[in-house]
Amino acid sequence: MRPFGDATRRNIESACASFARLPDEAAPSALKRAAVVLALTEANDGDDTAFLLTKRASSLRAHRGQWALPGGRCDAGETPVEAALRELDEELALKLSADAVLGLLDDYPTRSGYLITPVVVWAADSAAIRPNPDEVASVHRIGLDTIERDEAFDFTAIPESTRRVIRFHHQMSLIHAPTAALIYQFREVLAGRQTRVTELEQPVFAWK
């Protein structure tokens, strides 16, 4: 159990500070920059700390109806942190400043041509969350104890790749990479482990 409060915030910020991110590539990348948010907030029961997971609106052009962390493409001249905070506001009406950022995880390259930077933030006041119906069908609070269970993640093989496919078991759903990979690395950071996820594979339906 990680009670939602200042002590947990300090512990997670310390864990993020101890995590050594993979260095940025020196050469310009052909991948488009994007950012997602692991927004830490109060769990539904009011005791544990949780992160926010959304189900994307069915009207969206890409990845409609899929589970996702809040986020999206970086605008021109925008840093990943700026993009993450903007997207959090646009999707869930959560306005946070840069002071809420606890750290960054490894950039994750996707098969669809994006380089995603995961930004960990502390959302102290989440009572006013209002999902934008144009982008978000529903928003869910996933307790950190959920992702720390041994059976929360598994790995499987597909004939199209030599890389392992990661899956996060959430309720009756299977959530795949990139979302599952980023949540998994956050779980590892919480445990003090330097675990890389860039080679974890996405299912074929996410390659486009």
Image (tube, rainbow, N blue to C red):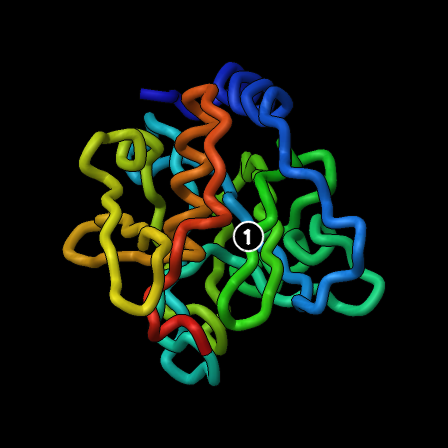
Above or below, 118 against 100 in this view is below
- Horizontally, is 159 left or right of 69 in the view? left
- Horizontally, is 29 left or right of 49 in the view? right
Q: What residue is rendered at 40% in x and 71% in y?
A: 206
Q: Is residue 80 visible?
A: yes
Q: Quadrant of residue 45?
A: top left
Q: Position of residue 190 (x, y in %)?
A: 45, 25
**Residue under pointer 1:** 108
Q: Secondary structure at mark 1?
A: strand
Q: What residue is rendered at 73% in x and 62% in y?
A: 29
Q: What residue is rendered at 31% in x and 36% in y?
A: 147
Q: Nearer the viewer, residue 57 or 68?
A: 68
Q: Quadrant of residue 106?
A: top right
- Horizontally, is 182 left or right of 81 in the view? left
Q: Position of residue 205 (x, y in %)?
A: 34, 75
Q: Nearer the viewer, residue 38 or 140?
A: 38
Report the residue that reaches farthest toward the right: 77
- Local packing at callout 1 (Cα closer than 10 Å; few below 14, some 14-19, many 20+) is many
Above or below, 67 against 52 in this view is below
Q: What residue is rendered at 23% in x and 39% in y?
A: 152
The quadrant of the rendering that contains the N terminus is: top left
Q: Label 1 amino acid?
A: Tyr
Q: Nearer the viewer, residue 53 or 62?
A: 62
- Horizontally, is 102 left or right of 38 in the view? right
